[in-house]
Amino acid sequence: MLSAKSLFQEILDHDESFRLFCSIAAGGEAQGGWENGRIATLVPSAERALAPKIARHGADEDKHGRVFRALLKKRGLIPAAVPPETDYTMLLERRGIGLAHARLRRDEPLGERDIIVYLSHSRVTEQRASEQMRFLLRHFADHPEVGRAVRLIAVDEDNHLAYTHEELLRFAAAGHGRLIQRTLRECALAEIRVHRDVSLAVMAHMGRILGWPRTKCVLLAAGIRAVYVYERLAGWRRMVSLSLPARRDPLGGPATPAHEFA
Ligand SMILES: [Fe+2]
Ligand SMILES: [Fe+2]
């Protein structure tokens, strides 16, 4: 049967598809870690209180990168090159979503606006991360090889999402509501397109590795496009709403270690 669960199971079961999956995931996490690390360093003095939370966000993403690399190592695999068309983080950056890497490389403090752009970008991408991890948690939480990693990362991504809600609401209360809504909308509409394109590219690579028949590839591509149509019509709105999280200050305190992986 063609279900998301069975597809992912197939990807897990084959060394080469597992290698590509973990390599893409590790690459995205590491880029997120680097971005957050730079943003934490460049936080404007008026927002100094945010710096440790952004640093923690970055440390978490770096940790996720290490977790995916550890999964590869456990199976005796080395990371594969990430095909550019599957590089979600880089494609978003190229579309001008979030803060440009060239800007982050400059040793010049960010402004308040930059922090709002960073938080809005994170609000949207962490929603995606949290939903993807929830899917894995539902079906693979007890998987002997990846279960522990899935459980650990899922908790972190939920915390990241909650943190962006909380901080954006604080900026909205300080009078930045319009800028936040505009930025969130722009990020969400770009993200759903990049997500579609990356999903199509990843599926094409997996199809080649796993020798999927043409009908299966056509069906999968149609499914990915149908999700995009739904997201463009209505689904994108779930990425731009803001509500106070049940657990306040979710990124307060140090990152939880991942000794068993790193
Ligand atoms: Fe992550
Ligand atoms: Fe995250």
Image: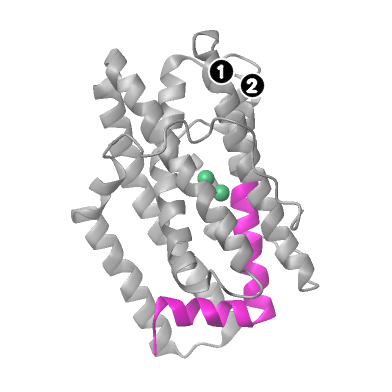
Q: Which residues are magenta?
A: 1-30
Residue, far top: 46
Provide the residue designation for mark 1. Answer: 43
The x, y position of residue 154, in whole percent, is: 51, 55
Q: CA distance from mark 1 to mark 2?
A: 6 Å
Asked if residue 57 shows in the view, the reply is yes
Disc 1 + disc 2, Cβ < 8 Å: yes
Identify which residue, 22 or 146, lies in the foreground: 146
Q: Quadrant of the N terminus?
A: bottom left
Q: Is residue 245 above or below residue 131?
A: above
Q: Position of residue 201 (x, y in %)?
A: 49, 66
Residue at (50, 30) in percent of width and height: 99
Residue sticking out furthest to the left: 233
Instruction: Work out whether residue 117 or residue 46 is closer to the camera in this orientation and state it.
Output: 46
Task: Say whether residue 89 is magenta.
Answer: no
Q: Residue at x 61, y 14 (%)?
A: 108
Q: Residue furthest front?
A: 247
Label 2 sits on residue? 41
**Is 200 in front, or is 170?**
170
Label 2 element class: helix
Residue found at x 58% / y 42%? 32
* Magenta portion: prevailing SS class: helix
Looking at the image, can residue 80 be seen? Answer: no
Q: Position of residue 175 (x, y in %)?
A: 27, 14
- Asked if residue 155 is positioned above or below residue 18 in the image, the reply reads above
Mark 1 crowdedness (10 Å alpha carbons): few <14, some 14-19, many ≥20 = many
